[in-house]
Image: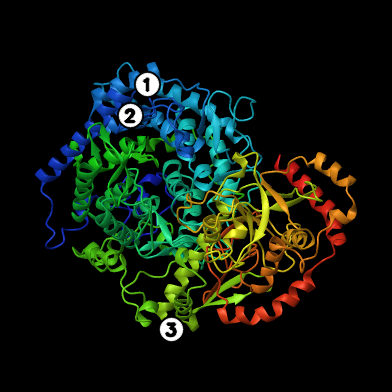
Amino acid sequence: MALSAAPGCRAGERGPRWRRPWKLLALGLLSASSVLAAAPGAGAMSREEKRRLGNQVLEMFDHAYSNYMEHAYPADELMPLTCRGRVRGQEPSRGDVDDALGKFSLTLIDTLDTLVVLNKTKEFEEAVKKVIKDVNLDNDIVVSVFETNIRVLGGLLGGHSVAIMLKEKGEYMQWYNGELLHMAKELGYKLLPAFNTTSGLPYPRVNLKFGVRHPEARTGTETDTCTACAGTLILEFAALSRFTGTSIFEEYARKALDFIWEKRQRSSNLVGVTINIHTGDWVRKDSGVGAGIDSYYEYLLKAYVLLGDDSFLERFNTHYDAIMRYISQPPLLLDVHIHKPMLNARTWMDSLLAFFPGLQVLKGDIRPAIETHEMLYQVIKKHNFLPEAFTTDFRVHWAQHPLRPEFAESTYFLYKATGDPYYLEVGKTLIENLNKYARVPCGFAAMKDVRTGSHEDRMDSFFLAEMFKYLYLLFADKEDMIFDIEDYIFTTEAHLLPLWLSTTNQTISKKNTSTEYTELDDSNFDWTCPNTQILFPNDPMFAQSIREPLKNVVDKSCPRGISRAEESLGSGPKPPLRARDFMASNPEHLEILKKMGVSLIHLKDGRVQLVQHAVQAASSLDAEDGLRFMQEMIELSSQQQKEQQLPPRAVQIVSHPFFGRVVLTAGPAQFGMDLSKHKAGTRGFVATIKPYNGCSEITNPEAVKEKIALMQRGQCMFAEKARNIQKAGAIGGIVIDDNEGSSSDTAPLFQMAGDGKNTDDITIPMLFLFNKEGNIILDAIREYEAVEVLLSDKAKDRDLEMESMDQKSSESDAHKPNSEEAPSDSQDAGAVGEEPEGGGESSAVGDPDPLSAASTASASVSMAQEDPHTSGSAEASAPEPACTPGDSQPQEQNTQTEATSKAHWDSKVQPMESILADWNEDIEAFEMMEKDEL
């Protein structure tokens, strides 16, 4: 990236709008040697040490590259643990990760310009010949538009850029005649069908051979894409247009950027993570600078640098002001809601945001860049690598590390900006950790878990494309390079595009006069030359003084000591209460919530709402804990909503006199027997259990053995109920909602989740019935001697033979004594009268807007008071009730209800005629449900 100050302009002087914007880049970053002296005690790294580390980077690259060429080429990537190539379709699918693989020798193309940066010109020439000779871009394969653009199209363009540079120098590549550019143009045309949308936003995937809409394309049905996926095209597409003179590529990329800009949230000037490519509606309304958005911001600034279009800088400045206003919480960068930017959307950060300090350097905002980079470095020193995600208290959230280069990128830019040898030491640490922990005989393996040091059999192409490029440039002096790196701009994949493209084939109007911009009162990015004395004070302690307060930020926060609320309880050093561990039946947890200013409100529909009022917390620190807990609860609820949706199940009454005519819609369980894989289902007589909530050892196992147990919802986790009845010998279980009047007719599908632990020990099927449907079975027990049901994935044909025999029987024989005279099974129903009516809470339908009452001083979230579950609602903006096992209702209240429960049970009994009248409705509803499922 060009790092020179704009010539002919004094510091702080207002100048004209630049004709050569790359000289304004980074708002006047100076060369490393002229900015800061080494901090006292740190010591400047000797030239010999820098050269040694540079040579070590070259050796590491050779190890990775040669193993790819020997064991993997022409496959897309190397599998370094098994020393073979990864060919899509021949290895188990890894989901979206495999969308980067297109059977086009991905790693080789991605590495082309790295070879030249590392002075490996002979290897580069050989590699270009291999690409021209061997690579086929016309494969019948579905690939990611985003990944193919930045890695393959960018790799071909970067290779072409350095190829023509070498050819001009007269020693290498004299035979080259633009072959890589011809391939890039071919690939560009293959990506264009993805833009066939009314919005101009591209589909996320495209078939290289058949496009999007072709019957054999196997794609084109997607509706959503990430902001970065649609907004990270302009550099490669514009370069392709400028190189070839074909304007269509730049036009399509600009249209996509324009659409995203127009759809920004106008009050916050933030964009969401995921957008509908047809309507422009935000699907995920959280906003940050990490995964899903990151390179959109990067390309706005770099598009201004490469293309000289003022509108891109104005857009970037508008977004940057919003980022620093809402997302930046130095040294943290936390996602927020675009409509409520003062409210954090999650309590963890992903590793992709590590690029942002480098972008801030290019912006000229050095202090926050130093702060965030130092925080990330402290996390690395603790775990050897940057975990894929980590919490605000610096615990590992996602433990993987696929050898990402973003932190090395920011380290390089900070060193170029400050000249501080500290960043050379940071780079040295990265080199040592890679060699010590990631190096394997056949290359470098990604870390499966940074905590254990376990490996994953993958070496992504970006490792060769970016990591070694930035590390080598960090230690290289200008005389070590065979060309001037400042004549090029780095793409997000670190491919090199020449800055002279800004004046070549300008077929696009520079100024977008139809777009409105927000006026910002911020002189830092006004049209002036930067004052380098403000950006880089002539103080050897400048960068160190910013870093010093952050030296122990990770050690102080992770692992944390005594939680303030727990300390006040005298419970000793314990980790803070996390949302995933919270149990509403745990008095200690409730006391901790109280200390944090969090209260529980019982709603009329049976749900429990958590509300935090910071002013009610025991202290400001406890209020901070409470806010974090609420954020985790919201995030946990949202995650549960995204869990796999299971289809509804059926409870079919097959005994006399029903014979399969009554089919009740039942909610599935995310544990136990999968009824979709057992077509015969589970058939058996039902029996109510004692205790009726099923939360302790069953006291009537003789009545439950080899039967399907009926139990009431509440007071413990669903998995605990299942284990207890399974231990008693039940062959299945039906949980009946205790929320009076709840029905599958009006409530979303209810799924019973596990308890967060391994539930493989549960082997029996478990289903959930709302109150109305559950009462049909309970009333049938009261009316008849025995009730037999079938638990299945869908209703079976009714027993016509038995039904015919029943019609020949007398009506007196058909009916059995009432519940007062019935033997054991029917008397079990009487256990209902001995159990608390309100033992559990209702089907917890997601709150339409659980944050509607939230403000800067308080926050709330609705949740199920009982077992975690996933609602069938498709409302994207409504996080599902959180995982909150147990019941906060005191046991004393349970005993008070026992005296009146019998009378209440009698009052609930409906005549069978009334129940029979509802059966047709139930059957029709179930038939409609089956049609919807199909």
Residue that carries the numbered disc 1 in the rendered image: 131
Left or right, 809 with respect to 314, comes to right
Residue appearing at x 65%, y 63% in the figure:
843
Callout 2: SS: helix
Q: Give the amino acid at mark 1.
A: Val
Residue 115: where, in percent of width, then height?
27, 30
Depth check, mark 3 against mark 1: the one in front is 3
Q: Earlier in the sequence, mark 3 or mark 1?
A: 1
Q: Give the amino acid at mark 3.
A: Ala
Tell me if mark 3 has few (under 14), some (14-19) or many (20+) residues whose alpha carbon lies within 10 angstroms of its own.
Answer: some
Return the mark for residue 212: none
Q: Earlier in the sequence, mark 2 or mark 1?
A: 2
Return the mark for residue 112: 2
Residue 602: where, in percent of width, then height?
62, 75
Image quadrant holding the N terminus, namely top left
Residue 799: where, in percent of width, then height?
78, 41
- Tell me if I can see residue 877 in this picture: no
Instruction: Tell me the distance, in whole angstroms, between the alpha carbons under discs 2 and 1.
Output: 9 Å
Residue appearing at x 40%, y 30% in the figure:
157
Residue 264: where, in percent of width, then height?
57, 55
Residue that carries the numbered disc 3 in the rendered image: 618
Of residues 868 and 76, the one drawn nearer to the viewer in this rendering: 868
Of residues 62 and 81, the one drawn nearer to the viewer in this rendering: 81
Q: Give the amino acid at mark 2.
A: Leu
Compared to residue 262, the image places residue 590 above or below, namely below
